[in-house]
Image (spheres, grey):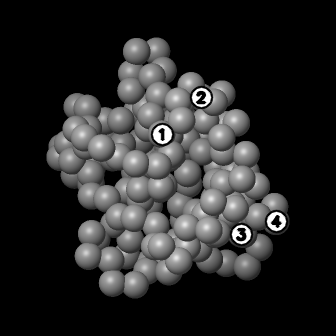
Amino acid sequence: MKMTNPALAMGDILRAWTPFDGHPNVAGPKFRPVIFLGETVINGVTHWVVAYGTTRMQAGKESKSGTDFIIRCTNDSSMVMNSDTRFDFSKLFAIPATTEFFSANKRSTLARIAKIPQQDLPQAAACMAAAKVGQALGRLGVRL
């Protein structure tokens, strides 16, 4: 079933059953935070392009090329982020915009949405530039 969020904006944070690289059309096992970057149509199906998010913060997991940043979880009333999360703009996914991928119970057609905190926007923009997100979105057919 298609998601019905009317107005997602670049930078919105939502959760997705992020697929594994080898199986891009199969929902993954973990419902993780992702950053929405745009929308495209692939083979007649609407996909949301998102940047990967992980709550794993071990040393050595961070990007060495400046393409990732951490958002600290503080008082998130949207209940999208439940712990500090590292987002990596060098890992983008085009995921079908369906309940299978973006709904916690795989039935609800509305996703909960959080925003990147204002103080983190400059770092997010720098990471997007380092990862050449604009070029990647162009290759995926996302219109900016």
Name of the residue lying farthest toward the top: 43
The residue under label 3 is: 61
Q: Amino acid at mark 4?
A: Lys
Look at the numbered discs 1 and 3 and tell me whether their residues touch, using CB distance below 8 Å.
no
> Could you tell me if the residues under marks 4 and 1 are in contact, i.e. CB atoms within 8 Å?
no
* Badge nearest the viewer, 4 or 1: 1
Image point (53%, 77%), residue name: 119
Q: What amino acid type is highlighted by mark number 2?
A: Leu
- Gap in Å between the C-alphas at discs 4 and 1? 25 Å
Task: Say if 93 sits above or below 111 in the image.
Answer: above
Q: Which residue is mark 1?
A: 38
Image mark for residue 64: 4
- Label 1, label 3: how far apart the Cα atoms are: 26 Å
Nearest the eye: 91 or 4: 4
Mark 4 neighbour density, 10 Å: few (under 14) some (14–19) many (20 or more): few
Which sits earlier in the primary sequence, circle 3 or circle 2?
Answer: 3
Amino acid beneath label 1:
Gly
Q: Position of residue 15 (x, y in %)?
A: 38, 56
SS for callout 2: loop
Q: Amino acid at mark 3?
A: Lys
Q: Where does label 2 land, which residue?
A: 140
The alpha-carbon separation of the residues under discs 3 and 2 comes to 26 Å
